[in-house]
């Protein structure tokens, strides 16, 4: 059984049972069965499945490991966490986070005015809100309104100009002043694709000189008691824990120095995000070199050690690890529409009464190949096809002969791979990789997996079924956009092998896992393909229930959303059609009905004929 590295990336959330991918939770429902139930209602195109119990699991894991580290290290500060809304702002995610997180006082982080309004409307009063990113006066005033409304809000300043605005607003209004945080620009940089978030050239944060100026500014404005937090962030999806340890030492010492400078209300260090999840599905290539246990223990131990050395009280610890919380909860499922070598099937062979000798030889090889002779016959077939191509170029065989030769050789190669599937040779491995099958998936990579397109970020992918059969086709995945970048190519270092299926006889579904972070917020409507149909799956001991379904936008709505007037479009289409000639009234009515049907559907394909 080929398990597609499920023991590496799935974190025990999914299992393979009875040749299918199933949820490793309560009644263990099959992903395939869930998808088939949804598709029974004529849903086509990609499907996004949400599993809120996985959000609950991650929140519980984050808090329990930090609480354990605090206890084991005799740490005297508290642990707090906020979810960065930029990671996934969609209602079914935020609602699950706030409902589940209420038991932990799990908060929200906002990086824009819209996100701040959302946080203020969703979060309980006893849970924290942190505000990061660049801010104008309006956004800062929103922070004051949040504080006045009873929210535990901290505005993190990214520059001295923002602090000057806070001082100005505090002077002229009678609203409660929110807590203030300072983003520090560390010398330490992170690791991985997003490492540029840290270091001296980072986009955000105050230098040492600016921090000292900020303290003076707060003292002069009698607002130093509002400074409660320092914040740093050295990058999302940190692959290596060593840079974090360096950053903790640097930030911890800055915190201790500020306390000695008179910042008596300073009580928290926000270590930002960066807690990585495992995306790789090959044992030789991992996304991270640490566990949540090591991560939490390192943070707590190092901060405690620094504060003890400096004679400073242990600060409360904040994290903003959003990817860790939501990546695993969402699975993108897409049907395969076509295998590009499907034309190489036996049914397309059309022999003549008299065929070229080399073609007859290929025919013999195909009929007589077996486990003992397959390597020899494979070599003969590859030699013959080159000769037949030459004969075609010289005009000695026709197009039908060439077609028959290509089909025969393709099937001889396939038979050889199956006959030798119990062992492998260098030659067969190279042949397998060079003869890739292209699988056309009913999805847009730009819409549903934008980080693959933009950053080549890998996502675990596997079939939902047929898992008792060894997959032998080296696979590249093509999406349905009209763009050559819409492809996940075969990578010999991280190979993907899929099954050889006859889509005329059976359906074939692929699941993309750990897609719950950033992909929806970054997805683009390239070629006007919009978000897939979405379902929340609630699982109990007796089965599962589908909830919170959101349909993919229909074609008219897509056009309306980018500024076109859907009524004008519909009127024009009908007008042009009615002015044309029809054989009879029935034909006209049928065509109008089809037009109405087509424009009320989403833009994804229904089938490939």
Image (tube, grey):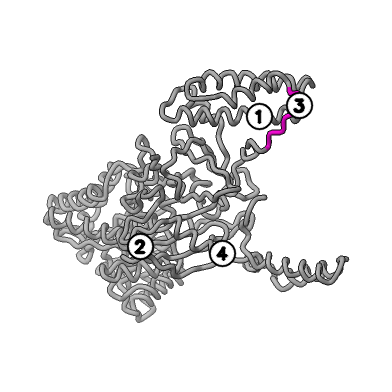
| Mark 2 or 1, closer to the camera | 1
Q: Which residue is mark 3?
A: 353
> To which quarter of the image does residue 214 belong?
bottom left
Q: How many marks?
A: 4
Does the CB distance between marks 2 and 4 fall below 8 Å?
no
Q: Nearer the viewer, mark 3 or mark 4?
A: 3
Residue 524 appears in the figure: yes
Mark before the other along the chain sequence, 2 or 1: 2
- Mark 1 vs 3, N-terminal side: 3
Q: CA distance from mark 2 to mark 1?
A: 55 Å
- Label 3 neighbourhood size at 10 Å, few (<14), some (14-19), many (20+)? few
The range drawn in magenta is 348-355
Look at mark 4 in the image and give the residue it sits on.
552
Instruction: Give the distance between the C-alpha atoms of the residues marked 3 and 4, in whole angstroms.
Output: 53 Å
Pointer 2 residue: 83
The residue shown at (61%, 63%) is: 602
Visible in this render: residue 479?
A: no
Q: Secondary structure at mark 2?
A: strand
Q: Is residue 279 magenta?
A: no
CB under 8 Å between callouts 3 and 2? Answer: no
Q: Secondary structure at mark 3?
A: loop
């Amino acid at each position: 059984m080929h398990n597609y590295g499920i023991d590496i990336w799935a974190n025990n959330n999914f299992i393979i049972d009875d040749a299918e991918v199933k949820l490793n939770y309560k009644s263990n429902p099959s992903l395939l069965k869930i998808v088939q139930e949804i598709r029974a209602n004529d849903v086509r195109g990609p499907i996004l499945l949400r599993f809120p119990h996985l959000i609950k699991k991650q929140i519980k894991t984050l808090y329990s490991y930090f609480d354990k580290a605090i206890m084991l290290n005799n740490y005297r500060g508290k642990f707090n966490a906020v979810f960065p809304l930029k990671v996934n702002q969609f209602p079914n995610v935020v609602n699950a986070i706030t409902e589940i997180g209420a038991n932990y006082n799990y908060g929200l982080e906002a990086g824009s005015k819209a996100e701040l309004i959302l946080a203020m409307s969703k979060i309980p009063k006893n849970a924290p809100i942190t505000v990061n990113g660049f801010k104008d006066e309006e956004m800062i005033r929103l922070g004051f309104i949040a504080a006045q409304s009873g929210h535990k809000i901290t505005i993190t300043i990214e520059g001295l100009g923002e602090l000057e605005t806070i001082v100005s607003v505090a002077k002229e209004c009678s609203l409660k002043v929110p807590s203030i945080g300072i983003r520090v620009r560390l010398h330490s940089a992170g690791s991985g694709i997003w490492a540029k978030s840290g270091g001296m050239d980072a986009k955000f944060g105050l230098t040492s000189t600016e921090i000292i100026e900020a303290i003076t500014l707060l003292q002069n404005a009698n607002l130093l008691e509002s400074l409660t937090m320092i914040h740093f962030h050295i990058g999302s999806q940190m692959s290596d824990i060593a840079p974090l340890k360096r950053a903790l030492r640097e930030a911890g010492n800055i915190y201790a120095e500020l306390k000695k400078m008179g910042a008596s209300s300073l009580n928290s260090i926000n270590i930002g995000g960066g807690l990585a999840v495992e995306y790789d599905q090959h044992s030789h290539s991992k996304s991270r070199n640490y566990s949540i246990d090591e991560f939490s223990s390192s943070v707590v131990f190092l901060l405690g050690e620094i504060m003890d050395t400096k004679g400073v009280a242990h600060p409360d610890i904040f994290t903003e690890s959003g990817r860790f919380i939501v990546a695993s909860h969402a699975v993108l499922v897409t049907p395969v529409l076509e295998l590009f070598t499907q034309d190489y099937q036996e049914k397309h062979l059309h022999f003549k009464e008299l065929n070229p000798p080399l073609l007859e030889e290929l025919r013999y090889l195909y009929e007589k190949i077996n486990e003992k002779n397959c390597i020899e016959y494979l070599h003969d077939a590859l030699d013959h096809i080159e000769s037949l191509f030459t004969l075609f170029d010289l005009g000695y065989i026709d197009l039908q002969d060439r077609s028959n030769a290509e089909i025969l050789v393709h099937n001889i190669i396939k038979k050889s791979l199956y006959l030798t599937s119990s062992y492998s040779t260098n030659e067969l491995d190279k042949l397998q990789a060079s003869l890739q099958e292209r699988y056309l998936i009913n999805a847009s990579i730009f819409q549903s997996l934008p980080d693959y397109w933009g950053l080549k970020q890998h996502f675990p992918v596997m079939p939902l079924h047929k898992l008792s059969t060894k997959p032998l086709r080296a696979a590249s995945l093509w999406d349905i956009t009209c763009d050559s970048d819409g492809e996940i190519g075969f990578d010999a270092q991280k190979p993907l092998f899929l099954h050889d299926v006859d889509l005329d006889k059976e359906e074939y579904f692929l699941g993309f896992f750990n897609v719950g972070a950033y992909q929806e917020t970054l997805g683009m409507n390239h070629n006007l393909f919009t978000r897939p149909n979405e379902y929340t799956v609630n699982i109990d001991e007796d089965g599962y229930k589908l909830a919170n379904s959101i349909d993919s936008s229909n074609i008219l709505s897509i056009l309306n959303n980018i500024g076109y007037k859907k009524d004008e479009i519909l009127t024009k289409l009908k007008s042009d059609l009615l002015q044309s000639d029809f054989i009879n009234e029935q034909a006209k009515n049928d065509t109008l009905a089809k037009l109405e049907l087509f424009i009320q559907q989403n833009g994804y394909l229904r089938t490939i004929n």
